[in-house]
Image: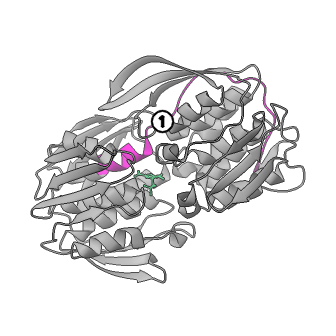
Amino acid sequence: MKPRRFMPSGPLRGTIRVPGDKSISHRSIMLGTLAVGETRVTGLLEGEDVLSTAAAMRAMGASVERIGDGEWAVHGVGVGALLQPQAALDMGNSGTSTRLLMGLVASHPISATFIGDASLSKRPMGRVIEPLGRMGAAFEASEGGRLPLTVRGALPAVPIEYRLPVASAQVKSAVLLAALNTPGVTTVIEPVPTRDHSERMLRGFGADLSVEVEADGTRVIRLAGEAELKPQTIEVPGDPSSAAFFIVAALIIPGSELTIENVGLNPTRAGLIEVLRQMGGQITEVDRREVGGEPVADLIVRHSALKGIEVDPAIVPSMVDEFPVLFVAAALAEGTTITTGLEELRVKESDRISVMAVALTGAGARVTEAADGLTIEGTGGEPLRGTSNSRTKTHLDHRIAMSMAVAGLASRDGVEIDDTRPIATSFPMFEALLDGLAG
Ligand code: S3P
Protein backbone atom coordinates (compact mmCIF):
# COMPACT_ATOMS: atom_id res chain seq x y z
CA MET A 1 0.00 0.00 0.00
CA LYS A 2 1.23 3.51 -0.80
CA PRO A 3 -1.13 6.04 0.80
CA ARG A 4 -1.07 9.73 -0.05
CA ARG A 5 -3.05 12.82 0.90
CA PHE A 6 -3.97 15.07 -2.04
CA MET A 7 -4.10 18.62 -0.69
CA PRO A 8 -6.18 21.62 -1.85
CA SER A 9 -4.65 23.23 -4.90
CA GLY A 10 -4.28 26.68 -6.38
CA PRO A 11 -5.26 27.29 -10.02
CA LEU A 12 -4.03 24.80 -12.64
CA ARG A 13 -2.31 26.75 -15.40
CA GLY A 14 -0.01 25.82 -18.22
CA THR A 15 0.26 23.17 -20.92
CA ILE A 16 0.46 19.41 -20.46
CA ARG A 17 0.39 16.25 -22.54
CA VAL A 18 -1.20 13.02 -21.39
CA PRO A 19 0.22 9.58 -22.24
CA GLY A 20 -0.86 7.45 -25.17
CA ASP A 21 -4.28 5.87 -25.42
CA LYS A 22 -4.49 2.61 -23.49
CA SER A 23 -6.94 0.87 -25.84
CA ILE A 24 -4.88 1.75 -28.92
CA SER A 25 -1.60 0.82 -27.21
CA HIS A 26 -2.84 -2.71 -26.37
CA ARG A 27 -4.11 -3.21 -29.90
CA SER A 28 -0.89 -1.90 -31.49
CA ILE A 29 1.13 -4.63 -29.79
CA MET A 30 -1.43 -7.37 -30.44
CA LEU A 31 -1.93 -6.55 -34.12
CA GLY A 32 1.83 -6.00 -34.55
CA THR A 33 2.29 -9.56 -33.29
CA LEU A 34 -0.14 -10.81 -35.93
CA ALA A 35 1.64 -9.08 -38.82
CA VAL A 36 4.82 -10.58 -40.25
CA GLY A 37 7.59 -7.96 -40.11
CA GLU A 38 8.24 -4.87 -38.02
CA THR A 39 5.48 -2.65 -36.64
CA ARG A 40 6.76 0.65 -35.21
CA VAL A 41 4.77 2.42 -32.52
CA THR A 42 5.31 5.92 -31.11
CA GLY A 43 3.43 7.43 -28.18
CA LEU A 44 2.79 3.98 -26.70
CA LEU A 45 1.41 4.06 -23.16
CA GLU A 46 4.06 2.49 -20.96
CA GLY A 47 1.61 1.62 -18.19
CA GLU A 48 1.52 -1.72 -16.41
CA ASP A 49 -1.57 -2.92 -18.29
CA VAL A 50 0.08 -2.45 -21.68
CA LEU A 51 3.31 -4.03 -20.40
CA SER A 52 1.22 -7.10 -19.44
CA THR A 53 0.07 -7.32 -23.06
CA ALA A 54 3.67 -6.93 -24.28
CA ALA A 55 4.90 -9.72 -22.00
CA ALA A 56 2.11 -12.04 -23.14
CA MET A 57 2.87 -11.41 -26.81
CA ARG A 58 6.53 -12.18 -26.18
CA ALA A 59 5.51 -15.41 -24.46
CA MET A 60 3.63 -16.31 -27.67
CA GLY A 61 6.55 -15.68 -30.01
CA ALA A 62 6.70 -11.97 -30.87
CA SER A 63 9.64 -9.72 -30.21
CA VAL A 64 8.38 -6.56 -28.48
CA GLU A 65 11.14 -4.07 -27.76
CA ARG A 66 11.38 -0.61 -26.27
CA ILE A 67 13.52 1.62 -28.45
CA GLY A 68 12.99 4.95 -26.70
CA ASP A 69 10.47 6.97 -24.78
CA GLY A 70 7.11 5.60 -25.94
CA GLU A 71 8.80 4.21 -29.03
CA TRP A 72 8.47 0.47 -29.55
CA ALA A 73 9.18 -2.11 -32.25
CA VAL A 74 7.11 -5.26 -32.60
CA HIS A 75 8.35 -8.11 -34.78
CA GLY A 76 5.26 -10.18 -35.46
CA VAL A 77 4.79 -13.87 -36.19
CA GLY A 78 1.66 -13.59 -38.35
CA VAL A 79 -1.96 -14.73 -37.98
CA GLY A 80 -2.07 -18.45 -37.18
CA ALA A 81 1.51 -18.61 -35.92
CA LEU A 82 1.22 -17.79 -32.20
CA LEU A 83 3.38 -20.11 -30.12
CA GLN A 84 2.36 -22.10 -27.08
CA PRO A 85 3.24 -20.01 -23.99
CA GLN A 86 5.43 -21.96 -21.56
CA ALA A 87 3.99 -20.46 -18.38
CA ALA A 88 0.75 -18.85 -17.18
CA LEU A 89 0.15 -15.37 -18.63
CA ASP A 90 0.03 -12.82 -15.79
CA MET A 91 -2.43 -10.12 -16.80
CA GLY A 92 -1.97 -8.06 -13.62
CA ASN A 93 -4.92 -5.66 -13.33
CA SER A 94 -5.79 -5.61 -17.03
CA GLY A 95 -9.21 -6.74 -18.21
CA THR A 96 -8.50 -5.54 -21.74
CA SER A 97 -5.36 -7.67 -22.05
CA THR A 98 -7.18 -10.70 -20.68
CA ARG A 99 -10.33 -10.54 -22.78
CA LEU A 100 -8.64 -9.61 -26.06
CA LEU A 101 -5.89 -12.21 -25.68
CA MET A 102 -8.47 -14.89 -24.83
CA GLY A 103 -9.89 -14.11 -28.27
CA LEU A 104 -6.51 -14.45 -29.95
CA VAL A 105 -5.74 -17.79 -28.31
CA ALA A 106 -9.24 -19.12 -29.05
CA SER A 107 -8.52 -19.71 -32.75
CA HIS A 108 -4.91 -20.91 -32.46
CA PRO A 109 -3.86 -24.52 -31.78
CA ILE A 110 -2.41 -23.60 -28.38
CA SER A 111 -3.61 -23.35 -24.82
CA ALA A 112 -2.95 -20.57 -22.35
CA THR A 113 -3.65 -20.01 -18.68
CA PHE A 114 -4.53 -16.48 -17.58
CA ILE A 115 -3.91 -15.23 -14.06
CA GLY A 116 -4.29 -11.76 -12.53
CA ASP A 117 -4.42 -9.64 -9.38
CA ALA A 118 -7.23 -9.64 -6.80
CA SER A 119 -9.28 -7.08 -8.76
CA LEU A 120 -8.99 -8.86 -12.12
CA SER A 121 -9.70 -12.23 -10.49
CA LYS A 122 -13.16 -10.96 -9.47
CA ARG A 123 -14.17 -9.83 -12.96
CA PRO A 124 -16.56 -11.83 -15.17
CA MET A 125 -15.03 -13.61 -18.17
CA GLY A 126 -18.22 -15.49 -19.11
CA ARG A 127 -19.03 -12.69 -21.55
CA VAL A 128 -16.07 -13.76 -23.74
CA ILE A 129 -16.13 -17.48 -22.90
CA GLU A 130 -19.64 -17.68 -24.34
CA PRO A 131 -18.96 -16.46 -27.93
CA LEU A 132 -15.45 -17.95 -28.07
CA GLY A 133 -16.90 -21.30 -26.94
CA ARG A 134 -19.34 -21.11 -29.84
CA MET A 135 -16.34 -20.64 -32.14
CA GLY A 136 -14.94 -23.94 -30.83
CA ALA A 137 -12.54 -22.96 -28.04
CA ALA A 138 -12.65 -24.86 -24.73
CA PHE A 139 -12.33 -23.27 -21.28
CA GLU A 140 -11.58 -24.29 -17.73
CA ALA A 141 -12.43 -21.31 -15.57
CA SER A 142 -12.63 -20.69 -11.84
CA GLU A 143 -16.05 -20.38 -10.23
CA GLY A 144 -18.32 -17.82 -11.88
CA GLY A 145 -16.25 -17.79 -15.10
CA ARG A 146 -13.34 -16.03 -13.43
CA LEU A 147 -9.52 -16.14 -13.41
CA PRO A 148 -7.41 -18.27 -13.14
CA LEU A 149 -8.67 -19.65 -16.41
CA THR A 150 -7.32 -21.83 -19.23
CA VAL A 151 -8.27 -21.44 -22.89
CA ARG A 152 -7.73 -24.26 -25.38
CA GLY A 153 -7.89 -22.87 -28.87
CA ALA A 154 -9.69 -24.56 -31.77
CA LEU A 155 -8.23 -25.26 -35.21
CA PRO A 156 -10.08 -24.57 -37.29
CA ALA A 157 -12.38 -22.31 -35.30
CA VAL A 158 -15.85 -21.78 -36.73
CA PRO A 159 -17.17 -18.39 -37.81
CA ILE A 160 -20.22 -17.16 -35.89
CA GLU A 161 -22.76 -14.41 -36.09
CA TYR A 162 -22.79 -12.82 -32.64
CA ARG A 163 -25.13 -10.18 -31.28
CA LEU A 164 -23.49 -8.49 -28.29
CA PRO A 165 -25.67 -8.92 -25.19
CA VAL A 166 -23.69 -6.19 -23.34
CA ALA A 167 -22.29 -2.98 -24.82
CA SER A 168 -18.64 -4.03 -24.57
CA ALA A 169 -15.76 -3.20 -26.88
CA GLN A 170 -13.74 -5.89 -25.13
CA VAL A 171 -16.22 -8.61 -26.07
CA LYS A 172 -16.53 -7.27 -29.62
CA SER A 173 -12.74 -7.16 -29.96
CA ALA A 174 -12.24 -10.67 -28.52
CA VAL A 175 -14.55 -12.11 -31.19
CA LEU A 176 -12.95 -10.06 -33.99
CA LEU A 177 -9.44 -11.12 -32.95
CA ALA A 178 -10.52 -14.77 -32.85
CA ALA A 179 -12.08 -14.27 -36.30
CA LEU A 180 -8.70 -13.33 -37.81
CA ASN A 181 -7.60 -16.98 -37.80
CA THR A 182 -11.04 -18.45 -38.50
CA PRO A 183 -12.00 -19.52 -42.03
CA GLY A 184 -15.06 -17.71 -43.46
CA VAL A 185 -16.78 -14.53 -42.35
CA THR A 186 -17.45 -13.76 -38.68
CA THR A 187 -20.18 -11.22 -37.94
CA VAL A 188 -20.53 -9.14 -34.78
CA ILE A 189 -23.77 -7.23 -34.34
CA GLU A 190 -23.52 -4.26 -32.05
CA PRO A 191 -26.91 -2.78 -31.09
CA VAL A 192 -25.20 -0.02 -29.03
CA PRO A 193 -21.97 1.34 -30.54
CA THR A 194 -18.83 1.02 -28.40
CA ARG A 195 -15.28 2.26 -28.97
CA ASP A 196 -14.26 1.33 -32.51
CA HIS A 197 -10.45 1.24 -32.28
CA SER A 198 -10.33 -2.47 -33.16
CA GLU A 199 -12.27 -1.92 -36.38
CA ARG A 200 -10.16 1.11 -37.39
CA MET A 201 -6.88 -0.62 -36.63
CA LEU A 202 -7.77 -3.98 -38.17
CA ARG A 203 -8.57 -2.13 -41.40
CA GLY A 204 -5.31 -0.19 -41.08
CA PHE A 205 -3.40 -3.49 -40.81
CA GLY A 206 -5.10 -4.67 -44.01
CA ALA A 207 -7.88 -6.94 -42.72
CA ASP A 208 -10.99 -7.37 -44.84
CA LEU A 209 -13.48 -5.76 -42.44
CA SER A 210 -16.72 -3.96 -43.22
CA VAL A 211 -19.16 -2.05 -41.02
CA GLU A 212 -22.77 -1.57 -42.01
CA VAL A 213 -24.88 0.83 -39.95
CA GLU A 214 -28.58 0.01 -39.91
CA ALA A 215 -31.38 2.59 -39.69
CA ASP A 216 -31.67 2.20 -35.88
CA GLY A 217 -27.92 2.67 -35.41
CA THR A 218 -27.11 -1.04 -35.01
CA ARG A 219 -23.63 -1.76 -36.37
CA VAL A 220 -22.99 -4.97 -38.28
CA ILE A 221 -19.28 -5.75 -38.44
CA ARG A 222 -18.03 -8.47 -40.80
CA LEU A 223 -14.49 -9.78 -40.82
CA ALA A 224 -13.11 -12.26 -43.37
CA GLY A 225 -10.86 -14.77 -41.64
CA GLU A 226 -7.48 -16.29 -42.46
CA ALA A 227 -6.35 -12.70 -42.72
CA GLU A 228 -2.89 -11.55 -43.69
CA LEU A 229 -1.96 -8.45 -41.73
CA LYS A 230 0.73 -6.04 -42.87
CA PRO A 231 3.04 -4.33 -40.37
CA GLN A 232 2.28 -0.67 -39.72
CA THR A 233 3.74 2.52 -38.34
CA ILE A 234 1.42 3.76 -35.62
CA GLU A 235 1.32 7.07 -33.77
CA VAL A 236 -0.81 6.62 -30.66
CA PRO A 237 -2.89 9.71 -29.76
CA GLY A 238 -3.21 10.94 -26.14
CA ASP A 239 -5.71 9.07 -24.01
CA PRO A 240 -8.99 10.98 -23.47
CA SER A 241 -9.62 8.82 -20.39
CA SER A 242 -6.38 10.11 -18.84
CA ALA A 243 -7.03 13.70 -19.99
CA ALA A 244 -10.40 13.43 -18.18
CA PHE A 245 -8.83 13.89 -14.72
CA PHE A 246 -7.11 17.12 -15.74
CA ILE A 247 -10.17 18.38 -17.61
CA VAL A 248 -12.32 18.02 -14.51
CA ALA A 249 -9.61 19.38 -12.20
CA ALA A 250 -9.27 22.54 -14.30
CA LEU A 251 -13.06 23.00 -14.47
CA ILE A 252 -13.57 22.80 -10.69
CA ILE A 253 -10.52 24.68 -9.39
CA PRO A 254 -11.08 28.47 -9.48
CA GLY A 255 -8.69 30.45 -11.65
CA SER A 256 -7.56 27.47 -13.74
CA GLU A 257 -6.78 27.65 -17.43
CA LEU A 258 -5.12 24.51 -18.71
CA THR A 259 -4.12 23.40 -22.19
CA ILE A 260 -4.01 19.64 -22.76
CA GLU A 261 -2.32 18.77 -26.03
CA ASN A 262 -2.96 15.88 -28.41
CA VAL A 263 -6.14 14.45 -26.87
CA GLY A 264 -7.87 11.67 -28.84
CA LEU A 265 -11.44 12.69 -29.65
CA ASN A 266 -12.83 9.59 -31.33
CA PRO A 267 -16.64 10.09 -31.07
CA THR A 268 -16.95 6.67 -29.38
CA ARG A 269 -14.75 8.02 -26.55
CA ALA A 270 -15.68 11.70 -26.27
CA GLY A 271 -18.88 11.50 -24.18
CA LEU A 272 -17.39 13.15 -21.09
CA ILE A 273 -16.55 16.35 -22.95
CA GLU A 274 -20.10 16.60 -24.25
CA VAL A 275 -21.60 16.04 -20.79
CA LEU A 276 -19.26 18.55 -19.13
CA ARG A 277 -20.20 21.13 -21.77
CA GLN A 278 -23.90 20.47 -21.04
CA MET A 279 -23.02 21.22 -17.40
CA GLY A 280 -21.54 24.56 -18.46
CA GLY A 281 -17.91 23.52 -18.73
CA GLN A 282 -15.74 25.72 -20.96
CA ILE A 283 -13.72 23.32 -23.08
CA THR A 284 -12.34 24.65 -26.36
CA GLU A 285 -10.86 22.47 -29.10
CA VAL A 286 -7.89 23.86 -30.98
CA ASP A 287 -6.14 22.50 -34.09
CA ARG A 288 -8.36 19.51 -34.83
CA ARG A 289 -6.32 17.01 -36.82
CA GLU A 290 -5.80 13.28 -37.40
CA VAL A 291 -3.20 11.22 -35.54
CA GLY A 292 -2.91 7.49 -36.19
CA GLY A 293 -6.27 7.45 -38.00
CA GLU A 294 -8.03 9.04 -35.00
CA PRO A 295 -9.41 12.59 -34.56
CA VAL A 296 -7.28 14.60 -32.12
CA ALA A 297 -7.23 18.19 -30.81
CA ASP A 298 -5.60 20.33 -28.14
CA LEU A 299 -8.08 21.26 -25.42
CA ILE A 300 -8.18 24.53 -23.50
CA VAL A 301 -10.11 24.08 -20.27
CA ARG A 302 -11.15 27.03 -18.05
CA HIS A 303 -12.60 27.03 -14.56
CA SER A 304 -16.40 27.06 -14.95
CA ALA A 305 -19.48 27.28 -12.75
CA LEU A 306 -20.88 23.80 -13.41
CA LYS A 307 -24.57 22.97 -13.15
CA GLY A 308 -26.06 19.56 -12.33
CA ILE A 309 -27.84 17.73 -15.15
CA GLU A 310 -29.58 14.47 -15.87
CA VAL A 311 -27.07 12.49 -17.95
CA ASP A 312 -28.64 10.75 -20.97
CA PRO A 313 -27.94 7.00 -20.55
CA ALA A 314 -27.44 6.72 -24.33
CA ILE A 315 -24.08 8.46 -23.91
CA VAL A 316 -22.74 5.92 -21.38
CA PRO A 317 -20.70 3.69 -23.76
CA SER A 318 -18.76 6.74 -25.06
CA MET A 319 -17.64 7.65 -21.52
CA VAL A 320 -17.82 4.33 -19.71
CA ASP A 321 -14.46 4.84 -17.96
CA GLU A 322 -15.09 8.51 -17.13
CA PHE A 323 -17.96 8.26 -14.64
CA PRO A 324 -15.79 8.23 -11.49
CA VAL A 325 -14.35 11.63 -12.40
CA LEU A 326 -17.70 12.93 -13.68
CA PHE A 327 -19.08 12.15 -10.20
CA VAL A 328 -16.39 14.43 -8.77
CA ALA A 329 -17.41 17.24 -11.16
CA ALA A 330 -21.05 16.67 -10.14
CA ALA A 331 -20.12 16.92 -6.45
CA LEU A 332 -18.82 20.45 -7.08
CA ALA A 333 -21.63 21.57 -9.44
CA GLU A 334 -24.67 23.61 -8.50
CA GLY A 335 -27.78 21.45 -8.18
CA THR A 336 -28.44 17.78 -8.79
CA THR A 337 -26.77 15.42 -11.24
CA ILE A 338 -28.56 12.16 -11.98
CA THR A 339 -26.84 9.24 -13.73
CA THR A 340 -28.57 6.02 -14.82
CA GLY A 341 -27.80 3.04 -17.03
CA LEU A 342 -24.41 2.44 -15.40
CA GLU A 343 -24.78 -1.28 -14.52
CA GLU A 344 -21.51 -2.07 -16.35
CA LEU A 345 -19.59 0.11 -13.89
CA ARG A 346 -20.15 -2.53 -11.23
CA VAL A 347 -17.86 -4.99 -13.07
CA LYS A 348 -14.90 -2.70 -13.83
CA GLU A 349 -11.61 -2.77 -11.86
CA SER A 350 -13.90 -2.19 -8.86
CA ASP A 351 -17.64 -1.67 -8.42
CA ARG A 352 -17.31 1.95 -9.44
CA ILE A 353 -20.86 2.90 -8.43
CA SER A 354 -20.62 1.84 -4.81
CA VAL A 355 -16.90 2.58 -4.38
CA MET A 356 -17.39 6.17 -5.60
CA ALA A 357 -20.56 6.58 -3.49
CA VAL A 358 -18.61 5.61 -0.36
CA ALA A 359 -15.51 7.62 -1.34
CA LEU A 360 -17.37 10.85 -2.15
CA THR A 361 -19.65 10.56 0.87
CA GLY A 362 -16.53 10.12 3.01
CA ALA A 363 -15.17 13.37 1.54
CA GLY A 364 -18.35 15.27 2.42
CA ALA A 365 -20.38 15.03 -0.81
CA ARG A 366 -24.12 14.29 -0.83
CA VAL A 367 -24.60 11.10 -2.82
CA THR A 368 -27.44 8.61 -3.21
CA GLU A 369 -26.72 5.20 -4.72
CA ALA A 370 -29.20 3.37 -6.97
CA ALA A 371 -28.79 0.01 -8.70
CA ASP A 372 -27.70 1.64 -11.96
CA GLY A 373 -26.18 4.99 -11.03
CA LEU A 374 -25.65 7.82 -8.56
CA THR A 375 -27.59 10.97 -7.77
CA ILE A 376 -25.32 13.74 -6.50
CA GLU A 377 -26.23 17.08 -4.91
CA GLY A 378 -23.40 19.44 -5.70
CA THR A 379 -21.86 22.10 -3.45
CA GLY A 380 -22.31 24.85 -6.04
CA GLY A 381 -18.56 25.35 -6.25
CA GLU A 382 -17.72 25.34 -2.52
CA PRO A 383 -14.84 22.97 -1.76
CA LEU A 384 -15.76 19.53 -0.42
CA ARG A 385 -14.95 18.98 3.25
CA GLY A 386 -12.35 16.31 2.40
CA THR A 387 -11.19 13.52 4.70
CA SER A 388 -9.43 14.55 7.89
CA ASN A 389 -8.97 11.24 9.67
CA SER A 390 -10.11 8.55 7.25
CA ARG A 391 -8.56 7.00 4.18
CA THR A 392 -10.41 6.60 0.91
CA LYS A 393 -10.51 2.97 -0.19
CA THR A 394 -9.63 2.61 -3.86
CA HIS A 395 -9.98 -1.21 -4.21
CA LEU A 396 -7.03 -1.59 -6.63
CA ASP A 397 -8.79 0.73 -9.08
CA HIS A 398 -6.61 3.34 -10.80
CA ARG A 399 -9.53 5.50 -11.90
CA ILE A 400 -10.96 5.68 -8.35
CA ALA A 401 -7.52 6.76 -7.08
CA MET A 402 -7.12 9.50 -9.71
CA SER A 403 -10.72 10.71 -9.34
CA MET A 404 -10.40 11.05 -5.57
CA ALA A 405 -7.03 12.78 -6.01
CA VAL A 406 -8.88 15.39 -8.09
CA ALA A 407 -11.55 15.62 -5.36
CA GLY A 408 -8.73 16.30 -2.88
CA LEU A 409 -7.53 19.29 -4.91
CA ALA A 410 -11.02 20.79 -4.62
CA SER A 411 -11.42 20.10 -0.88
CA ARG A 412 -10.81 21.95 2.37
CA ASP A 413 -8.85 19.30 4.31
CA GLY A 414 -7.45 17.27 1.40
CA VAL A 415 -8.34 13.66 0.55
CA GLU A 416 -6.20 10.77 1.68
CA ILE A 417 -6.09 7.76 -0.61
CA ASP A 418 -5.17 4.31 0.72
CA ASP A 419 -3.02 3.26 -2.24
CA THR A 420 -1.69 5.21 -5.22
CA ARG A 421 0.19 2.27 -6.79
CA PRO A 422 -2.65 1.16 -9.14
CA ILE A 423 -2.38 4.53 -10.92
CA ALA A 424 0.64 3.07 -12.73
CA THR A 425 -1.59 0.62 -14.61
CA SER A 426 -2.80 3.39 -16.93
CA PHE A 427 -1.05 6.68 -16.07
CA PRO A 428 2.39 6.29 -14.44
CA MET A 429 3.17 10.04 -14.68
CA PHE A 430 -0.14 11.20 -13.17
CA GLU A 431 1.20 12.35 -9.80
CA ALA A 432 4.28 14.01 -11.30
CA LEU A 433 2.13 15.93 -13.80
CA LEU A 434 -0.32 16.98 -11.11
CA ASP A 435 2.42 18.02 -8.67
CA GLY A 436 4.07 20.03 -11.43
CA LEU A 437 0.87 21.98 -12.00
CA ALA A 438 -0.53 22.24 -8.50
CA GLY A 439 2.92 22.98 -7.10
C1 S3P B 1 -11.80 -1.16 -23.38
C2 S3P B 1 -13.16 -1.27 -23.32
C3 S3P B 1 -13.97 -0.88 -22.15
C4 S3P B 1 -13.19 -0.03 -21.16
C5 S3P B 1 -11.79 -0.52 -20.95
C6 S3P B 1 -11.02 -0.60 -22.26
C7 S3P B 1 -11.10 -1.58 -24.60
O1 S3P B 1 -14.43 -2.03 -21.49
O2 S3P B 1 -13.85 0.02 -19.91
O3 S3P B 1 -11.10 0.34 -20.06
O4 S3P B 1 -9.91 -1.22 -24.79
O5 S3P B 1 -11.71 -2.28 -25.42
P1 S3P B 1 -15.80 -2.76 -21.95
O6 S3P B 1 -15.70 -2.93 -23.39
O7 S3P B 1 -15.83 -4.07 -21.25
O8 S3P B 1 -16.89 -1.82 -21.50
Query: In the image, is 165 to the left or to the right of 329?
Result: left
Query: In the image, is 360 to the left or to the right of 44?
Result: right
Q: Is residue 20 magenta?
A: yes
Is residue 394 among what the camera can see? Answer: no
Q: Could you say whether the residue bearing mark 1 is in a helix, strand or loop?
A: loop
- Residue extending furthest toward the top: 287
Q: Which of the 4 image quadrants contains residue 410? A: top right
Q: Which of the 4 image quadrants contains residue 173? A: bottom left
**What residue is shown at x 51% (from left), y 67% (from top)?**
120
Q: Is residue 1 above or below residue 316?
A: below
Per the rendered image, the range of residues in magenta is: 1-29
Q: Which residue is mark 1?
A: 270
Front-most of residues 154 and 330: 330
**What residue is shown at x 28% (from left), y 36% (from top)?**
234
**What residue is shown at x 12% (from left), y 72% (from top)?**
156
Is residue 390 among what the camera can see? Answer: yes
Image coordinates for residue 381, horizontal then vertical, percent: 80, 30
Mark 1: few, some, or many residues within 10 Å (few <14, many ≥20)? many
Q: Is residue 240 magenta?
A: no
